[in-house]
Image: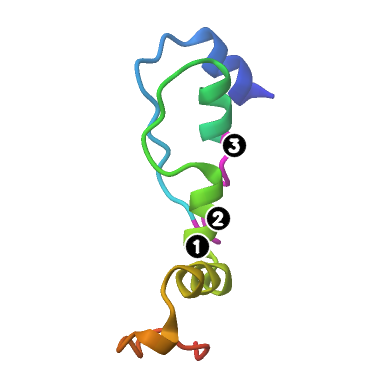
Amino acid sequence: MDLIKQMSEAKLDLVVPVGFGLNSPEDGTIFTIAKFFGIPCAGPSPFCGTVCTDKSIFQSVVRGIFDPASSNNDGISGEG
């Protein structure tokens, strides 16, 4: 893979992957390769990026943290 070769040969101080989400080419691969080579990487981890870009997973996480029964926050709903 060209990306692995490029990152292994480059003398990078920091990697900043740009763009997460459904229409983004960054699916966590760049972050993971940078971590493998010991290159610091700014931005969310692949897991965090996945959670934050998937509405149903994100809502599940938020509901797990905040008890809807004891909150006045009606902003989280299953409606899209």
Residue 34 picture location, percent across and down: 51, 24
Report whether 46 appears left or right of 62.
right
Dot 1 or dot 3, earlier in sequence: 3
Circle 1 residue: 53
Q: Residue at x 40, y 15 (%)?
A: 12
Picture quadrant of residue 56: bottom right
SS at mark 3? helix
- Alpha-carbon distance for marks 1 and 2? 5 Å
Please, what is the three-letter code of the amino acid marked with disc 3? Thr
SS at mark 2? helix
Above or below residue 12? Residue 15 is below
SS at mark 1? helix
Does the CB distance between marks 1 and 2 fall below 8 Å?
Answer: yes
Residue 36 picture location, percent across and down: 58, 20
Residue 28 or 78: which is nearer the viewer? 78
Residue 25 in magenta stretch: yes
Q: Residue at x 34, y 85 (%)?
A: 71
Residue 43 in magenta stretch: no
Above or below residue 5? Residue 24 is below
Please, what is the three-letter code of the amino acid marked with disc 2? Thr
Residue 77 or 27: which is nearer the viewer? 77
Residue 67 picture location, percent across and down: 44, 79
Circle 2 residue: 50
Region in magenta: 21-29
- Alpha-carbon distance for marks 2 and 3? 12 Å
Badge 3, how many Cα within 10 Å: few under 14, some, many 20+? Answer: some
Circle 3 residue: 29
Q: Residue at x 45, y 18 (%)?
A: 39
